[in-house]
């Protein structure tokens, strides 16, 4: 399935490149399918936080004009290869003003976009403060085979909190004792954290990336929600199970942003 | 109750916007009620510390003129949505010159204010050095039901130290062992820290925000006082109970500031 | 006693302000009594380390001229409210070029001085790298009542090392296990560290500030000496007793400076 | 063998220097043999990560023109003494934009190159963010003598993943308990990590440098691969064996880059 | 002995000052005797690492001309009071470009030199990244009395590695458990680390400074060598004895530099 879609994208890219005489390897007509890329395994996610440098603030608004449009255009140029989401963190985090979440089927494509983004005006005045890289993988513990009942519970727990306004990223690292447990022991732990959190999934959406060996953490956990108190209760539930005794990192940083279109995030920062 | 007040504020905002042709979504006539927002649950608190950049000091006083007035005006513009308190930390903390405490019923409103504050002259010359986000929740442990006698003690302990001049913020993080205790065990611990501290509440005011999952800590504890030696004794009492064996973070940073009006804090830094 | 002295200072300040039409709240004729403020309880100490910014070094000597005199004048202006000592750390510490130790009966007065110091030329070109705040309290463990013999020992141990040229500040933080011990257990520990260090007090002077809840540490220990090898031996003795097993922080940073007049420290840095 | 090759290089260098009147001690005709230096013991490896400074981004493209060519020329000038590989990390790591891996038979030669690289335009606008130094040594644990079967397994495990596009560097530090085990115990641990990882070597290439005493770590582990999910599984396997209980550092940072020629890396950053 | 030499130096200084009308307290004719000061007890050592600031690299070579000569002159001016060694670390360490090792009989003299060095052109463009201060003391554990045989071994182990090209500084800090052991236990540990390292002393020179209470570490261990693989083996031997279980810091940073004259280090950085 992935191959077919990617071949098609490549085909269009070649056609377009021929017609227009373009040499951008990133030009493509077929946009990545958001619904698919967010569900599939083997997809790379880059979460990068940025802080605007002091001299951005000292520029005149006139000098900053067009910065957002340039980012929008850059995102569009790469839309056949990467899916880009943007979040405003200014005021809610000390270390960043915004963050990007970039999905791609090849990590090199994600890097290509990041390199071009850093060439935009606002990219040039942004300092990278955190970069997390992960890959999606099939469900590991609470599968239909290993834990049928809980798996059903997970499947039937659907988000009903309305269009989410907030996104929170929590990097997670397990200790050596965790990894040295048997698969059965880890499954029991995973079940142990699933049971008390099931009820919270009505108000929190979540997505998992595997990072061991790719970044200095094991998992990137990404959440969306409207109700932050419900999320606070969910994380307390996650803290209150034995699995938490095996964490060496839970957060550090916790990245809290509001969800907007790419255009809106950068227009807010351009003004 | 919250809804009614917010609907009223929205109504006034619309009326005013129509009359004046304003397009600020933050304009509102009805100011947030300080007495209420500081008591209610479900209120968001942002505590953000700022350090003035070197080039602020190198500006001429003439260039800085009006900076404080601009902040006061920005606070006023958002007064229907957020309550803003300011504190001077210069000379008492290495990492900041001042800090803001911002309350709102929606965290997005707190962010809106922060974004606008960063657009003021002094905001543009300020580096954010710490941002803590929390939410108020109903009393958890020492409630009338779970611990009636101590609850009475807490209620009857009223601050008698005069208009407080100092505010201290201490971020608190519990370890996994704490969260894995039973509710009864945690209640016993909470009672254990309440008993020896009751007597100090005559000279210290306090407020609690829950942060688990929102920032890299579990609680923001905020205190006001005149008598810093009394506060030192209070914290020693908090250190001397078993609950303290479950802390992974108590401070780091401890933020110590003097309490002033927004106008006074920024006029001091403008001069 | 404190009240009388402070009332007198306030009286003079008012008289002077009336005569001269001054509005400085810090103006005062009666200087703080060094001998008294260094002995009394309830006195606030601020220890702040500073690093000169790169652009200070790049200024011409002509541009820096007068910087020391301005600091001396600022110190004099506040001499009714604060006692200021200065130390040169350049060359002996990576994180600072000098440090200030500021004593006051009200911490707000210490802050007032610090705010004014930061407005001087050299203050504007200095980055604050550490700020420790503490308060003096009566002797806690080795008192005449609790430990009469050792108390006598402490009293009879008088410094005989000549005018000290070096000052060393060591921040100290105890762990939760320490604070959860009984008072008797902590007294035994305190006696345990007093016995092997008594003999070193002939070559080292010391002063203690309590910081729990005011800064991110429990004690600021301040020492003066001429003989640094003797001090090295003293600290090894302090490391070699059980109390040291309860430290989470001992130093970090250790601040080592040479003792000079305010004038000399800043003239060295102005040249 | 090393001596012969180096004498030959020196001989050519002298001839060339005489003919051309050059005084560069680094000039040499005979390039280092990539195949040999990457296999031999006693070879020094420097892994250095660099972040471009803000003012690089603010330069006009015209001012940056030629930067890549200058690096290529510098590498060529030192090609008789050092082997230089370059990697693009921009977008995949927060702390760097690129990294260099430099091999030499004498560490002074590696330093000579680094000093000259820092004199190039892009070197002058680069901040060093990490430098790891190690030396290659003969196989220690899973040798033909100590562990004949596993050694055979290692030898027969050949990479079949195609021209690798990604390189990952993971610094490793063992704790004191590890080093205090007997050689037999450590051998058992090494065998324990070899068994579950053998099957992954078809998709991952690896190289080891010893760093104890030379940098603040014990081993620099360097990997190349195309399949990052396979690498994620390999590292999970390494985490899941008892040896991992003896690590004080595994990563921090993990450096993830894409593999390109020196020319391509710097042309990407020049544009 | 020390007194005599210092009195003589002071005498010459006075004579010279009278003749020339100089007022430099640091002027002295008699240079410090390298052979003696490197052997005696009670000598202060400052190890300071420096990183050149970005604007140094952006200066034109013409603007930097003379920088090395100025340092050489400054060192000469202080040569009656301090012995200065310089090392090039650029390319081998992330946090520094060079480091200085300064010996003096009075720490104030070392500081005087450092203050003057920071006034030179290159000193003004250097950021201090680490400063370690220690003092030499007589041998403590493996003395002729306490451990006669090993002491003989130490004395007969002479360096035979040729003029050393590399210097490595490793800061060491012991934990509270170490300092709470009896002297006999610590002696056994010291013997335990001496035995397996004796054989390496043929290729490594070493020197020890005591730092407890003066800097945030207990010992500065300084090594010189040509053979870095031999040094790697030596440190592995030091890691593999029980004493290592009592270290809280071993390195962090490990400072690795090449040995050159002061003139050569600064000429390399001036070019």
Image (tube, coloured by chain):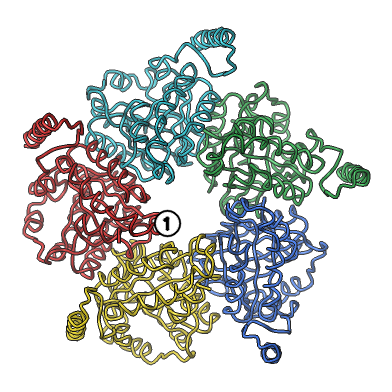
Chain colours: A blue, B green, C cyan, D yellow, E red
Residue D57 picture location, percent across and down: 53, 64
> Position of C33 compared to B37: left or right?
left
Question: Where does the image place residue E90, in percent across and percent down from the top left?
Answer: 32, 62
Which residue does the image show at 50% across and 78% down from the upper left?
A: D258
Q: Quadrant of the C terminus of chain B?
A: top right
Residue D2 makes an appearance in the image: no
Q: Which residue is mark 1?
A: E54
Q: Quadrant of residue C207?
A: top left
Which quadrant is the N terminus of chain B positioned in?
top right
The residue lying toward the viewer, choosing from B133 and A77, is: A77
Q: Position of residue D70 (x, y in %)?
A: 40, 74
Query: E120 or A9: nearer the eye?
Result: E120
Q: Is residue A230 left or right of residue C120?
A: right
Kindly tell me whether residue D201 is visible in this rendering: yes
Q: To which quarter of the image does residue B171 belong?
A: top right
Q: Is residue C199 above or below residue A117?
A: above
Q: Secondary structure at mark 1?
A: helix
Measured along the vertical axis of the image, is residue D268 above or below residue C169? below
Return the residue nearer the eye: A64 or D7. A64
Is residue D148 found left or right of C23 in the rendered image? left
> Which quadrant holds residue C143?
top left
Chain letter behind tag 1:
E
Q: D44 left or right of C132?
A: left
**Mark 1, other Cα within 10 Å: few <14 / some 14–19 / many ≥20:** some
In the rendered image, residue E29, in percent from the top left (x then y), is placed at 10, 39
């Amino acid at each position: 399935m992935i191959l077919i879609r990617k071949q098609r994208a490549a085909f269009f890219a070649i056609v377009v490149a021929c017609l227009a005489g373009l040499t951008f390897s990133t030009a493509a007509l077929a946009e990545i399918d958001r619904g698919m890329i967010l569900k599939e395994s083997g997809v790379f996610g880059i979460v990068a936080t940025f802080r605007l440098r002091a001299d951005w603030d000292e520029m005149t608004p006139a000098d900053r004009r067009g910065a957002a449009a340039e980012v929008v255009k850059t995102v569009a140029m790469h839309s056949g290869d990467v899916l880009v989401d943007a979040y405003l963190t200014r005021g809610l985090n000390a270390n960043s003003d915004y963050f990007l979440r970039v999905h791609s089927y090849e990590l090199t494509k994600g890097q290509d976009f990041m390199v071009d983004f850093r060439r935009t005006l606002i990219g040039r005045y942004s300092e990278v403060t955190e970069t997390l890289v992960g890959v999606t993988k099939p469900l590991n513990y609470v599968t239909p085979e290993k834990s049928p009942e809980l798996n059903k519970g997970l499947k039937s727990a659907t988000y009903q909190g309305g269009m989410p306004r907030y996104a929170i990223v929590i990097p997670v690292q397990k200790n050596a004792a965790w990894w040295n447990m048997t698969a059965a022991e880890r499954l029991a732990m995973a079940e142990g954290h699933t049971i008390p959190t099931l009820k919270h999934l009505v108000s929190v959406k979540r997505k998992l990336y595997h990072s061991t060996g790719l970044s200095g953490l094991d998992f990137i956990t990404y959440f969306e929600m409207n109700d932050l108190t419900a999320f606070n209760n969910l994380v307390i539930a996650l803290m209150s199970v034995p699995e938490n005794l095996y964490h060496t990192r839970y957060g550090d940083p916790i990245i809290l942003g509001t969800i907007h279109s790419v255009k809106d995030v950068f227009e807010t920062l351009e003004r």
